[in-house]
Image: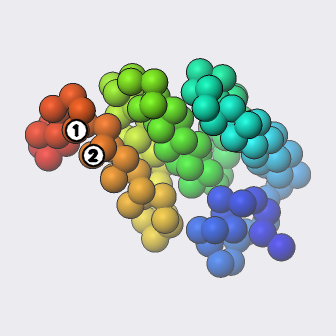
Amino acid sequence: MPSSFPEYISNLNPKPLSTKEQIDHNQAAFCIMKDLNYIDNHLVALKQLQQAEQIAIGQTDSNFLSYINAMIGRSYQQLGLFDNAIQQFQDSIENSFEAKQYYNVENSYKELVTAHQPQGTLAKLKN
């Protein structure tokens, strides 16, 4: 049985996690689930996701952190905080580089472009 939802959807042969990592994954997943309850209140959702991000930092499954970064970026984007959104999408991409075959890299690039467009800064992304 896969050890976490993000790992399950991105890796057909997930490696087992230590007990501490499993607890951290569960706590972060709980924060994400709480976030989904506040999907229309992006400030509350952002707080839940930032808690999940702090739990995920330093774990061996960096793709989990990448997933959280992308969700935070989407919340910032909905709040009109495009610079913060851009940074989160860039962090998401950076945290996914060691696992390029995972689904989140493509999504993060798409979100990064979408975040740059309203500001007219898409040319920065191309450099």
- Front one among 52 and 81: 81
Task: Give the total of numbered labels.
Answer: 2
**Labelled pair 1, 2 in contact (Cβ < 8 Å):** yes
- In this figure, which residue is indicated by the disc labeled 2? 113
* Quarter assignment of residue 115: top left
Display colour scheme = rainbow
Q: Quadrant of the C terminus?
A: top left
Q: Residues within 10 Å of mark 1 (few under 14, many from 20)?
A: few
Secondary structure under the numbered disc 1 in the rendered image: helix
Q: Quadrant of the N terminus?
A: bottom right
Residue 58 visible in the displayed image: yes
- In this figure, which residue is indicated by the disc labeled 1? 117
Residue 50 visible in the displayed image: no
Instruction: State the residue at coordinates (27%, 46%).
Output: 113
The residue type indicated by label 1 comes to Gln
Above/below status of 64 relative to 50: below
Above/below status of 110 relative to 39: below
- Front one among 114 and 19: 114
- Front one among 25 and 39: 39
Instruction: State the residue at coordinates (33%, 25%).
Output: 83
Above/below status of 71 relative to 97: above
The residue type indicated by label 2 comes to Val
Residue 4 in the figure: left or right of residue 84: right
- Front one among 29 and 79: 79
* Quarter assignment of residue 55: top right
Above/below status of 57 relative to 11: above
Instruction: State the residue at coordinates (57%, 27%).
Output: 42
Q: CA distance from mark 1 to mark 2?
A: 6 Å
Q: Residues within 10 Å of mark 2 (few under 14, many from 20)?
A: some
Residue 11, how many percent across, how many down? 62, 72
Secondary structure under the numbered disc 2 in the rendered image: helix
